[in-house]
Image (tube, rainbow, N blue to C red):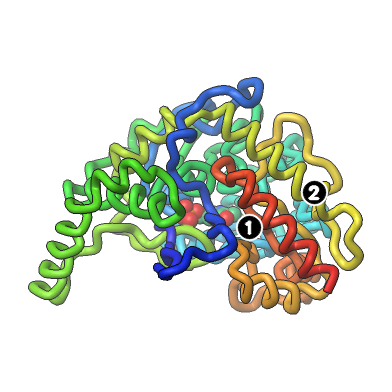
Amino acid sequence: MRDFTPPPVTATPPARPWVPLAPVLSRASFAKGGHAPVGNILDAGQVRLVTSGRVAIALALRAMGVAAGDIVLMPAYHSLSMIPPVLWRGATPRFYRVTPHAQVDLADLDARFDHRVKAIVVTHYFGFMQDMAPIRAWCDRRRVALLEDCAHCFFGEQVGASGDYAIASSMKFFPAYEGGVLASRRHDLAGIVLHCAGAGFETKVVLNTLEHSFAYGRLPGLRLLLAVPLRAKDLLWRLRKAGSARAPALAPASSDSEAGFDPAWLDKRSSWFARLLLRRVGHARIVGRRRANYAALQNACSDLAGARPLHAVLPDGACPWMFPLVVDAADTVFARLQREGVALTRFAETLWDGVDASVCANSVYLSRHVLAFPCHQELRADELAWLVDRIRAALQS
Ligand SMILES: *Cc1c(COP(=O)(O)O)cnc(C)c1O
């Protein structure tokens, strides 16, 4: 579930915009156009819509038959949320290396392989696809099941096409409060049966999605219309909390680098509202706007000393999750930007216990030096301009 701290309510509006780190719902969200149509993970075969990417990982591992005693090869450069599903199966993660540009190190896969390895997870970082043909061939040769982690790569022609299974995290690309995708082109998903998580959950998703958008100044008309009912809802929830010390959780732990994983959500279908958004929000606009915003950020950072984009070019048809910038003095720059309230994140800032430079020096370097900035479709022009201005200032001072 997306973590969100609403901006503080101040008497005088802040001189700078509050920039949402992830997409928020606006009227423009439903506009079409912006880019020639590209494929996405929903076209990658059979699909199940669940409540988070990590739940989809767990379902994929179970479907692959991963069980106690097995080893799952995991990238040393990872989100903490990817590991608990492996442990939930009773299996052991074994970490493989990535190159300085976060590509799978194929030679290292050979070094890590033994007969206990049952599956491998491959991540397309920041929306840049891995070169899947040699990885698929490696898996076929070794009889290892392949899980494509498309959490950063919802869109793209070949996304999810090479894996036995593929997963995605809807919240990273859509203005949704929850959502994960399990897809497979090679296996039948009929055995995976999902149930509605309940009226409380369905309601919460709608209200939280709207309140999150209101907090960033989106949908002002609807905000006025809903002011009274939303206040009544807050009151009711406060009463309900006061009444029962242990009210059931209405939301799965998820999103960003939180390692929370609750198996109770394994058989829960994504909410009606999140599923509606997946269909109705303009896909071509998402791709077009993200590419344009990414290009603007890349352009603005091209002449800065002490920082360089992780990738020199954004390939045709790729749809970025965020703009990853490799910064020499990352800690200082991160602290400076945070103080100013700039929206940014450090993917893989914390690595799983035991993953250090002896396992993969490149992963440790990337986890410390990559600052990722939002390039999502809901950034407004003034927000993007402010972001660019603050990034340049922080790197030049
Ligand atoms: C966010 C993320 C996940 C998990 O997705 P959730 O929807 O947050 O559970 C998996 N893999 C990667 C690489 C991620 O960044």
Which quadrant would the N terminus be assigned to in this image? bottom left
Mark toward the start of the polypeptide (1 vs 2):
1
**Who is closer to the viewer here, 25 or 145?**
25
Q: Distance between the residues labelled 1 and 2?
A: 33 Å
**Who is closer to the viewer here, 306 or 394?**
394
Q: Residue furthest left?
A: 243
Residue 2 relative to residue 242: left or right:
right
**Residue found at x 68% / y 59%:** 372
**Where residue 298 is drawn, which disc sits there?**
2
Residue 144, x across and y down, in percent:
62, 46
Q: How crowded is mark 1: few (under 14 residues within 10 Å), some or many (20 or more)?
A: many
Residue 226 relative to residue 333: left or right:
left
Residue 136 relative to residue 149: left or right:
right
Work out whether 383 lies above or below 377. below
Look at the numbered disc 1 and give the secondary structure of its residue.
Answer: strand
Residue 129, x across and y down, in percent:
71, 41
- Under mark 1, the amino acid is Leu
Q: Which residue lies furthest to the front in this view?
A: 12
**Who is closer to the viewer here, 387 or 306?**
387
Q: Is residue 222 visible?
A: yes
Look at the numbered disc 2 and give the secondary structure of its residue.
Answer: helix
Residue 304, x across and y down, in percent:
88, 61
Q: Residues within 10 Å of mark 2 (few under 14, many from 20)?
A: many
Residue that mark 1 sits on: 73
**Residue found at x 60% / y 77%:** 353
